[in-house]
Image (tube, helix red, strand yellow):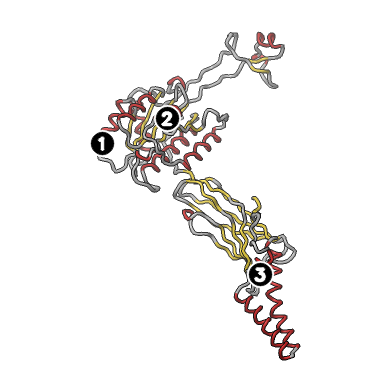
Amino acid sequence: MAEHRPPAGAEDDRGPLRAAFAGLTTRGRSFLAAGGAAAACAYLLGQPDLLRVGMLLAALPVLCVLVLHGTRSRVAAARRLSPARVGAGSEARVHLRVENVARVPSGLLLLQDRVPYVLGPRPRFVLDRIEPGGRREVTYRIRSDLRGRYPLGPLQLRLADPFGMVELSRSFNAYDVMTVLPRIESLPPVRLGGDAGGHGDGRQRVIAVAGDDDIIPRDYRHGDDLRRVHWRSTAHRGALMVRREEQPLQARCTVLLDTRRRAYAGGGPESAFERAVSGAASVVSHLVALGYGAQLVTDTGLAMPGPDTSTADTTEVTGLIMDALAVVDHSANDGLDGALGGARGGDTGLLIAFIGAVDDEQIAVLGRLRQRATGAVALLAAGQWDPAYEADRLRALGQAGWTALALHQGVPLGRLWQQAALELAGAGRGVTGPR
């Protein structure tokens, strides 16, 4: 939990003390005015007792200003978001902690955290006085049906004295970011292919274990079986070298997301584009869980993870893709040519495409992309389309080598996934059952 500090230059240009006096409430100003009037009357009437009353009336708000001014800079605040990444429609908790590090008790505290309107109304809390060294913790919930990245903060604090003479405001400069991921639908545990070399059964390539000249040995590590020592390399290098273990070729999958604005109609969380984004996130999550190496490609040429991303951690790769899908937006592109450059060269493995409206030219591009894949499924994010036009586009995609299905609103993605598996199996393209 990081501490929130006030921003530099946050005080009024008139100076910190003058700014503090500007925080006098109507009651505080009235006390000052009454004290000044009593002092003037005491001078004119020669009444010293009245002067003492006037001084007391004027001293009370001044004393409150000085105490709050010293307390304001000695109040620390922190925020903790749990979790920082949630799915659309899920809740997150925000924990706020306020601590009084001064040697005097604080006054009444009014706490307000700034949140975007899509996360709900701004949370407000009233905290009673905090003893020296004490702390208070409050919690509120936030949720969003719209994916994206939303800033939380800065935290605003208003201090008031027990007599209601002064109210001073303070704004901290730290904020946190909440990432709302697309909705993820569960899919049936079937594999649609995509294994290396086009094998649907996930077979492994095994490096030879004895006497081959093309073996690439590695240095000996403590605990290695001495029977795996490669003596020819050991003699050549002058150090123990062992044969590598079996290395399976990982099944690969490329998910293509069409983000062209012209390809989709409508907006909002129930739009065809949001349905496509949610579908892409669901497929990535599902296939990574089955052991696939996943890549996200868009019509803009975006590839996630890219060629410069040096990580073999599937959790990290999935996080990168999900973060990209959380903020992906429409592009101004007219075509899908950028996907040809974004997809990794050679065999893309299993290819799953979420696309909008496509003409014959874009279908030709998809046909060239299909030639790199061991299997290809196109999910057409259909909006309010004419049934005849939709059927024509599905037929054209099928002629280009794709297994094409319509992604209608309200139809579970799992049902389409199962249907795609059956069609690929019927076409002899190597679908296998759950493992």
Classify 22 as above or below 216.
Answer: below
Which amino acid type corresponds to the residue marked 3 in the rendered image? Answer: Phe
Q: Quadrant of residue 246?
A: top right
Q: Secondary structure at mark 2?
A: helix
Instruction: Give percent across and percent down for residue 334.
Output: 36, 35
Dot 1 crowding, Cα within 10 Å, few <14, some 14–19, many 20+: few
Residue 37 image point, x, y percent: 67, 84
Locate residue 77: give its quadrant: bottom right
- Three-letter code, disc 1: Tyr
At horizontal 30% and vertical 32% (from top left) the residue drawn is 359
Q: Answer above or below: position of 91 versus 290.
A: below
Q: Of marks 3 and 2, which one's residue comes earlier in the chain?
A: 3
Q: Is residue 370 left or right of residue 83?
A: left
Give 310 or 196, whichever is nearer the viewer. 310
**Circle 2 residue:** 339
Q: Identify the residue under disc 3.
A: 21
